Amino acid sequence: MTATITVQGGLTAAPELRYSQSSIAIASGTVASTDRYLDKQTNEWKDGRKLYLRWSAFKDLAENIAASQLEKGAQVTVTGRLMTREYQDTSGQNRSVTELEVTDFAVSLKKATVAVTRAGSTGGRTNATASDGSWTTPGAADTTGQQTWGAGDDSPF
């Protein structure tokens, strides 16, 4: 059994996207989270303990993260399973590292805005609304041939 955790923090760099030898998309990066507390003597907020956690996402999730064009400092919420990976370093010594295998990845909207697009089942993207802001009819295809949301839908999600 593995532990599932959620970490909120800032990206230390833009997510990196690469592909495995079997063409599986892998996005990776580091999220930094710092405890903040109110110092009762000075009445100021101070930084406490720091956590830097490496994360990896796979397949469609990896491609969606990379397509989001997030930059260093973006505030995110990352959920996943803690996994320990063993490897040999360049000098031949056995090492292990604990990383977060991402199951969900979200951007904080406290200090940012997001234009949401829906990822199709084949990895393509479809805009949530038409250029004039109206919804299309149910089952209609947009000009790229991808499926769009119906007029009766309350939400594109």
Image: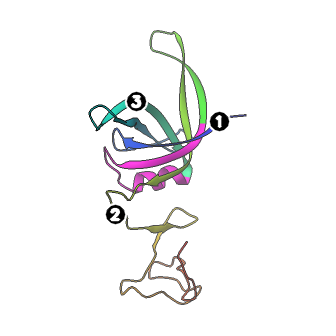
| Residue at position x 46%, y 33% in the image | 53
**What residue is shown at x 65% (from left), y 35% (from top)?**
3
- Outermost residue to the front: 41
Query: Helix or strand or loop: what does disc 1 sit on?
Result: loop
Number of other residues with Cα within 10 Å of mark 2, as a class: few under 14, some 14 to 19, many 20 or more: few
Q: Which residue is mark 2?
A: 113
**Residue 132: image location, x then y, percent:** 36, 87
Residue type at mark 2: give it.
Thr
Q: Earlier in the sequence, mark 2 or mark 3?
A: 3
Identify which amino acid the numbered label 3 is placed on.
Lys
Q: Which callout, 1 or 3, points at the residue further toward the start of the chain?
A: 1
Measure the C-alpha gap from mark 2 to mark 3: 26 Å
Mark 1 highlights which residue? 3
Is 57 situated left or right of 108 in this image?
A: right
- Find residue 60 and report its horizontal and vertical position in percent: 54, 54
- Name the residue nearer the viewer: 84 or 7: 7
Q: Is residue 128 above or below residue 74?
A: below
Name the image quarter holding residue 31: top left
Q: Nearer the viewer, residue 98 or 148?
A: 98
Q: Look at the picture and state if 77 lies above or below 109.
A: above
According to the picture, the residue beneath numbered tag 3 turns out to be: 50
Q: CA distance from mark 2 to mark 1?
A: 31 Å
| Vertical order, 21 against 134 (above or below) | above
Residue 76 forms part of the magenta stretch = yes
Residue 61, image x, y percentages: 53, 52
Residue pictured at 36% horizontal, 83% vertical:
131
Where residue 129 appears, as percent x and y from the top left, is 43, 80
The magenta segment: 60-81
User: Callout 3: 10 Å neighbours few (<14), some, many (20+)?
Assistant: few
Front-most of 4 and 145? 4
